[in-house]
Structures are given as structure tokens and as C-alpha cells.
Image (cartoon, rainbow, N blue to C red):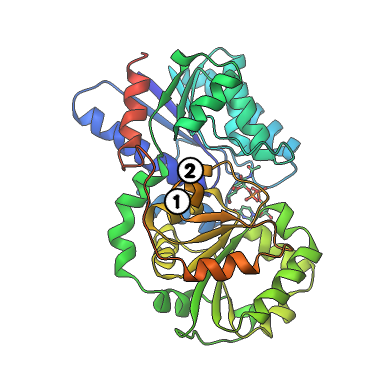
Amino acid sequence: MKILSVVATRPNFIKIAPFIRAIEKEREGGTDLTHVLVHTGQHYDNNMSASFFDEFQLPKPDYNLGIGSGTHAEQDGKTMLAFEQVLLSEKPDWVVVVGDVNATMSTCVTAKKMNFRVCHIEAGIRSFDRSMPEELNRIITDSIADLLLTPDELAIKNLLREGRKAEDIAFVGNVMIDTLDWLLPNAEKLTPKSIIEQKKAKSYGEKSFRESGNLVLITLHRPSNVDVIENLTAFLDWIERKTHCTFLWVLHPRTSERLKNFNLQARIATIKQLVMLEALTYTETLTLNLNVRTILTDSGGLQEEACVIGTPFLVLRQQTERPSTLIAAGGTGSIAGNTGADFDELFEAALKQERKAFRPHLWDGKTAERCLQEILSRS
Ligand code: UD1
């Protein structure tokens, strides 16, 4: 059997790494399996792409489509044209797509129109906010993929409600957690201090790291948070008032670009408890996750990791497609609204919240093996 997997952005690398290891293990057991890795190139910076290939011991991609940045139509259109050529020459038995980024959708549509079978890992999760590109990517992918592998039971309900048949759906658990379990021992060997001294973004003023006060990790990249200057300004004002905390803000390239365009770097340099950091490795991010009192984020993956290792977190969005990580479901997070919103009470409560690790059912580090077995059983 020939399986072709697609990756495009940072969160995809985290999800595909354990799947490729599962394929290698299966091959060692004697199964006749060929794997082809396609990187669309949506993320291309060393610290958004290449460094993860080293960290996750991923094989060099067989194809890099070089798509890069652009509008949605540009990214989707270019990906479809280039991916069509790959499919014509490779003719895989299965195409595997992960997550909810543009390439997930555009490669799935291309493959299905050419009658290739597609498996979607992380199927069925829904934010019910169709203004977000990721929600559209999820809905389109899940409406046509042949095999839908879900991280939780709620995702199965979503898919059945949308008219998908039970035989096309399998509950396998969360593949991100396979990577977390794999790299946790490495993360435990690092300290926030060493990471910060090494990675501090020099352009935001020289601040030395204080270990006193409550450590808070921030990651933001959604347009609703970082493309709106009023929200960013209100957020910075709020951070400045929180003198009992030290904020570690790990920058996504989109966010760096916006802060520069909005001329907010000088303002940031005056806030002494705010330290800006360049993009970190997966392991370094996990070290911060293990050591901070709370996290403010609009990332989906970080919510899941915080829940599993017990770190309280606030989702800086109006909703989440990952409700199984929230306090109401036994997890550690709360929805707090966008960066401009008033979430002070929730934040103070999160600072006092006990760390309590919570693993939703089948978030056990063995999801990738189950994904592969589901595919093999449909050969
Ligand atoms: C994408 C995904 C999002 C995912 C996120 C993880 C879609 C629609 N969005 O958003 O779901 O959570 O990745 O990071 O697919 N840039 C660089 N270097 C890079 C990559 C991006 O400088 O290696 C800059 C570019 O200026 C670009 C901007 O970041 O314009 C945004 O990148 P893009 O790939 O369009 O989307 P993300 O915001 O990263």
C-alpha cells in the first residue's frame, strides 16, 4: 500500500510525526508500506518549518510545493495545481490530511476530484464560527473525505449530524498528544530561564528575566486578535496593570509583522514585565507550559497540551472547537473573548487554580497507531 501524507504548517508537523513513526514500525513488522511526504511550503521560515523536521526526526519531504504566503485564494489555488501533478505521478492508495489549515482542504478537494481515497486525521471538531478559515476548511474536508478519524466523541456527533455515515468514522484519540508524550522527558530537562536568555527578541528593549511573580505564557496569531489595533492596544494596557506577573509572549510571524506595522514595539519596550520571545521549538514551548501559572492563547494545539499537563489557560477567542479541554468538561481552560475583552476576573481565578492534569478518553499517546490500523483495515 502507498500512503501519501500532506503537511503545510507548524501544527501539521506535530501531528504527522507520530503517524510516520507508526508507519516505520509497521514496516519493520513486515507490512508492505510505502510512504510519500508532501510539504506544501505554507510555512517556510527555518523556525516555523525546517527546525521542526529536525526536532521531530521527520524525513526530508519527497515534494516541497513552495506555496509560501499569500491570500487564501492564492494559497489554495497554487496548492491545487501543484498537488494535482504530485497525485498524477504518485497514484497513492490513500492521501492523509491533518488538522484544519488551507492545505488540508485544498489537497483533499484535489484528491477527491481525481477519485483518490482521503483520510482526515482530527476530523469532526467544530467551533461553529464560519468566519474563521479553519472552520470552513474542516467542514469542506469532512464533507468529502472517505475516512474520518476523530479526537473525541463530540466530533463523532458533529459528523453524524452533518450526514456522514457511522462506517466512515472512527474514534482514535488525539494524535498531538502522541508527540507530547514522546518529547515530555526532553522538555522536563530545560528551564524557562535558559530558554528566555537564549531567545529574547532583541528589538523590544533589553529586559532581564525575573523569576519572581506569576509566569504567564502568551501566544496569539488569529486575525481577530492580532489584526485589530484597538484589541492589541487594550491588551497591552491590561498587561501593564498586571504588575504581579511576568508575561512571556512567544511571537508568531503574523503577530511580529502586525506589531511592527502598528508601531507598537516602542510601547512594548516600556512594559517591564513583558518579555517578547522569537518562535520557540516544540520542546521549549512545552517547558514553558510545564512551568507557567497560566496561559493566554488563541492556538488550538496549545489548549490541548495545557489540559493534558494540567496548566490553567484562557482561550482568547469567542469560542473553541476543542471544548473537551475546558473546565466544564474536566479540563483546565476557560473561554475569555478576544484580546480587547475584559477577562481580568477569569485571569485572576486562573492564577489561583490548582494544576490538574486531565486526559480526555484515548488521549493516551497511541493515537497514530490506531490511525494507521484504521487505514490498513480498509486496504
Ligand atoms: C496558519 C493556519 C492556522 C494555524 C497556523 C499555525 C490557515 C488558514 N491557517 O495560520 O490554522 O493555526 O498556521 O501557525 O491555514 N509567515 C512567515 N513565515 C512562515 C509562515 C508565515 O513569515 O514560515 C508570515 C507571513 O507573513 C504570512 C503570515 O505569517 O503572511 C501568516 O501565515 P499564513 O500561513 O498565511 O497563516 P498563519 O497565520 O500562520
The residue to which callout 1 is attached is 331
Specify the amino acid type for callout 2. Answer: Ser
Secondary element at tag 2:
helix
Q: Are marks 1 and 2 in contact (CB under 8 Å)?
A: yes
Return the disc, 1 or 2, that comes first in the chain's sequence.
Answer: 2
Q: Quadrant of the N terminus?
A: top left
Up the image or down, 205 lies above or below 25; here it is below
**Residue drawn at (50%, 48%) of the image:** 328
Q: Split into 4 quadrants, where in the image is the C terminus?
A: top left
What amino acid type should be assigned to the residue bearing mark 1? Gly
Residue behind mark 2: 324
Residue 83: name its quadrant: top right
Residue at image position (27%, 20%) is 32
Q: Nearer the viewer, residue 58 or 86?
A: 58
Residue 330 image position (x, y, % from top left): 43, 48
* Residue situated in front as seen by the camera: 248 or 159: 159
Image position, residue 153 (x, y; %): 45, 31
Residue plotted at (41% across, 23% down): 170
Circle 1 Cα neighbour tier, 10 Å, few/some/many (<14 / 14–19 / ≥20):
many
> Which quarter of the picture shows residue 283?
bottom left
Q: Which mark is residue 109?
A: none
Q: Relative to 212, is 98 above or below?
A: above
Question: Is 151 placed left or right of 342 in the picture?
Answer: left
* CA separation in Å, label 1 and label 2: 7 Å
Q: Secondary structure at mark 1?
A: loop
| Residue 355 in sight from this viewpoint | yes
Closest to the observer: 59 or 160?
160
Q: Is the distance from the Cβ of mark 1 to the nearest ligand 1 atom less than 8 Å?
A: no
